Amino acid sequence: MAATAGAEGAAMAGLHPAVADYLAHLEVERRMSAHTLDAYRRDLAALAQWVDAQGRGDLLALDSAAIRAFVAAEHRRGLSPKSLQRRLSGCRSFFQWLLKHGRVVANPAAGVRAPRAPRKLPQVLDVDEAVALVEVPTDAPLGLRDRALLELFYSSGLRLSELRLLRWRDLDLEQGLVTVLGKGSRQRTVPVGSHACRALGEWRTDPAAGGAPGSMPGPDAPVFPGRGGAPISARAIQLRLRALGQRQGLFKHVHPHMLRHSFASHVLESSGDLRGVQELLGHADIATTQIYTHLDFQHLAKVYDDAHPRAKRRKGGG
């Protein structure tokens, strides 16, 4: 019934019925986040609008040449290679689902490739910057919350969506563990450092954490409540981190994923265990994690250039 309701809602928004069915499948059966659903909706709506504008008939009758023409049109319209790759990935997944359910005879997007995007390494904080950021004063308004939030982000490498939806039952502060539901509804349990455990314990006793007068929040309460007792919004966290970064004197635009990147880079730099970092981050494919090996190499190259006598001589022009 929920799937039908989702499909009807999407259809009312003017989407092709097959797209509406697919979005309902993603929402109900795959349990994708609202943010991910919006991305799929935009990508498939763009395809459907292009089909209508070109007079190519039914969306389900497209061939690979039509998909290539669509990608080329979006490229001419100014979409970046990264956006084109995401748009094509959405189309590919959509037609694969249709093929699985016998609604098309082939996946026209299967063999189509988008322009290659230049590899962009994520920006990270170095260890000193990360420590300076997380050690915010706890006597400031909501200081205990900010300290707990930052410590947990950096300690466990959580995604923004994973952190904001945490309930107290998901944390085991005695054992130093947190259990989260990541992308694709994959559950994982990751360590929580001692500093983060201490900060979370102190935050839970704060009246601002949402407990009844004289008591702590219950196990089902959000760890970081927003207005009305619901989990804090993603936007509120993003704005708070940016403000805290500026307050702590950092000259970088601090955002939630920067702390996740910093966590991964620092753990890999210390351990060299790529598979371990993959598990901690909850990446389904180790290729996603391998970007941190490039960051690690950048760090090693800098150490070499700063420390090796021959490197110094070369830099000096001798």
Image (cartoon, rainbow, N blue to C red):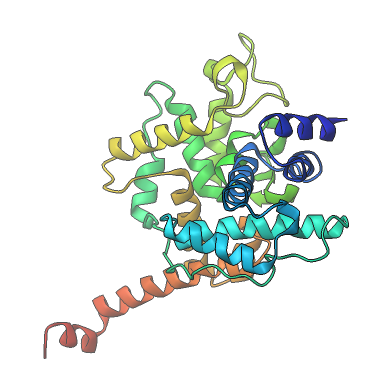
Q: Name which quarter of the figure residue 118 lies in.
A: bottom left
Position of the N terminus by quadrant: top right
Q: Residue at x 47, y 28 (%)?
A: 144
Residue at the limit of the structure toward the top, as seen here: 213
Q: Residue at x 79, y 66 (%)?
A: 106
Q: Nearer the viewer, residue 152 or 282?
A: 282
173 to 183, vertically: above or below: above
Q: Position of residue 38 (x, y in %)?
A: 61, 40
Q: Is residue 214 visible?
A: yes
Q: How many marks?
A: 0
Q: Is residue 282 visible?
A: no
Position of the C terminus by quadrant: bottom left
Q: Nearer the viewer, residue 285 or 85?
A: 85
Q: Position of residue 236 (x, y in %)?
A: 47, 29
* Left or right: where 317 falls relative to 80: left
* Left or right: where 193 falls relative to 236: right
* Left or right: where 107 falls relative to 77: right
256 to 112, vertically: above or below: above
Q: Position of residue 142 (x, y in %)?
A: 44, 23
Q: Position of residue 109 (x, y in %)?
A: 67, 65
Q: Nearer the viewer, residue 67 or 209?
A: 67
Residue at the limit of the structure toward the front, as seen here: 55
